[in-house]
Every structure is written in structure tokens, then in C-alpha cells.
Image (spheres, helix red, strand yellow):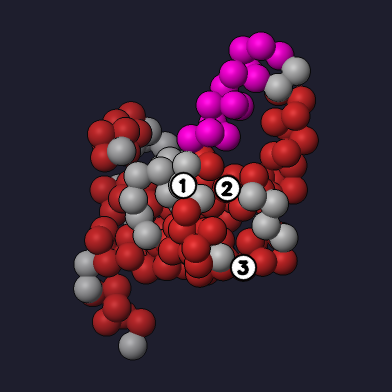
């Protein structure tokens, strides 16, 4: 992931830095985690970066929760996209053990702990595939994104961001 972010940061260095980190935060896999790393590399001030990355990470979540089943159903009608959907569903459902065991808090940790294959996108997809109620999954994903933001803030910007809060 770091190589991708480095490439994006260098390739788009002449672009508006805020736009670059916003776009990175919208993408699956990279999400807020990648956006904050890119923001630190592009020297975007912490608070501005945090707000932009959180908004970018949150925007896709309602669409995934509300529409992904219908989109997948439509994609399964076609051989090539149907295979991709089946693969993605299988891969995502392999990660269901935390959610099955701990429910709401399992989803919070799944979204919030920055490990490969976790995050808001995958959490929303998993919640949708497990048919978790949106009233339960949306807050869990939101809290998870806040947890990921805190962890990644420390990793990318260090302790000074904590001092600036107080």
C-alpha cells in the first residue's frame, strides 16, 4: 500500500493536495489510512487532512450498505462480472468470524484496526452480505473509521497531534 501511496503522492504532486488525499480516501484498500499517509507525505496540515480523509472514507459507505446487494445481483447476470462478484463475496465472507463472534464491536474493530483487507469499504460490504441492519452497521462502521483515524493519526503525524488537541 505504501508504494501505491508514494506513487500517487509523486505523480499528483502538482495537483491540489487536498483533492489528492480526498480521492485516495474514497478508494477501497487505501481509504482513510492511505489518505492520511499521503497527507503526511504531501505536508497537508493534520486537522485539514483528518477532516478531508474522514469525509472521503465515509462517503461510499451508505451507497455500499444500501445498494451493493442490488448491484451484485445485476453483475451476477454476466459471466465475467459474476465471477468477480462471487470471488469478492467469498473473500469477504472469510472475514466474518469477528462479526459473528462479537457483533457490533466486532465490526467496529474490523473497520478500525488498520490491517490489510479491513476498513470501511470491506466492513460495509461484510455487513451488507451478512444482512446486518443498517441501524446497527452504520454506527459501527462510523466508530471504526474514527478508531482508524486515531491510530493512523498517531502513525502518520505522531504524538504532536495529541498535544494540539489540548
Q: Residue furthest left?
A: 159
Q: Residue at x 27, y 67 (%)?
A: 154
Mark closest to the chain's N terminus, 2 or 3: 2
Q: CA distance from mark 3 to mark 1?
A: 19 Å
Mark closest to the chain's N terminus, 1 or 2: 1
Q: CA distance from mark 1 to mark 2?
A: 8 Å
Q: Which residue is mark 3?
A: 139
Residue 150 picture location, percent across and down:
37, 68
Residue 90 picture location, percent across and down:
53, 33
Residue 130 picture location, percent across and down:
64, 50
Front-most of residues 112 and 16:
112
Q: Residue furthest top?
A: 79
> Does the CB distance between marks 1 and 2 fall below 8 Å?
yes
Please rate how many residues cluster around mark 1, counting C-alpha atoms within 10 Å: few if below 14, some from 14 to 19, many from 20. Answer: some
Q: Say left or right for 71 vs 57.
A: right
- Residue 75 at least partly seen: yes
> Does the CB distance between marks 3 and 1 fall below 8 Å?
no
Image quadrant containing the C terminus: bottom left
Q: Which residue is mark 2?
A: 126
Front-most of residues 146 and 12:
146
Q: CA distance from mark 2 to mark 3?
A: 14 Å
Q: Which residue is mark 1?
A: 95
Inspect the magenta stretch and tell me whether residue 88 lies in it.
Answer: yes
Q: Residue at x 46, y 47 (%)?
A: 95
Magenta segment range? 78-91
Inspect the magenta stretch and tell me whether residue 63 lies in it.
Answer: no
Front-most of residues 106 and 147:
106
Q: Say left or right for 9 vs 145.
A: left
Q: Quadrant of residue 14?
A: top left
Amino acid at each position: 500500500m505504501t508504494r501505491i501511496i508514494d506513487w500517487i503522492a509523486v505523480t499528483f504532486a502538482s495537483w491540489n493536495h487536498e483533492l489528492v488525499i480526498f480521492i485516495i480516501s474514497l478508494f477501497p484498500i487505501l481509504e482513510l489510512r492511505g489518505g492520511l499517509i499521503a497527507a503526511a507525505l504531501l505536508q497537508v496540515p493534520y486537522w485539514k487532512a483528518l477532516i478531508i480523509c474522514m469525509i472521503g472514507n465515509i462517503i461510499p459507505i451508505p451507497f455500499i450498505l444500501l445498494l451493493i446487494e442490488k448491484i451484485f445481483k445485476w453483475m451476477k447476470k454476466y459471466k465475467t462480472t459474476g465471477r468477480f462478484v462471487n470471488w469478492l463475496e467469498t473473500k469477504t465472507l472469510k472475514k466474518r468470524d469477528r462479526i459473528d463472534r462479537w457483533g457490533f464491536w466486532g465490526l467496529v474493530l474490523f473497520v478500525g484496526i488498520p490491517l490489510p483487507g479491513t476498513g470501511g469499504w470491506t466492513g460495509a460490504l461484510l455487513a451488507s452480505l451478512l444482512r446486518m441492519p443498517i441501524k446497527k452497521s452504520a454506527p459501527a462502521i462510523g466508530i471504526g473509521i474514527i478508531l482508524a483515524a486515531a491510530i493512523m493519526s498517531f502513525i502518520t503525524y505522531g504524538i504532536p497531534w495529541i498535544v494540539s488537541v489540548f
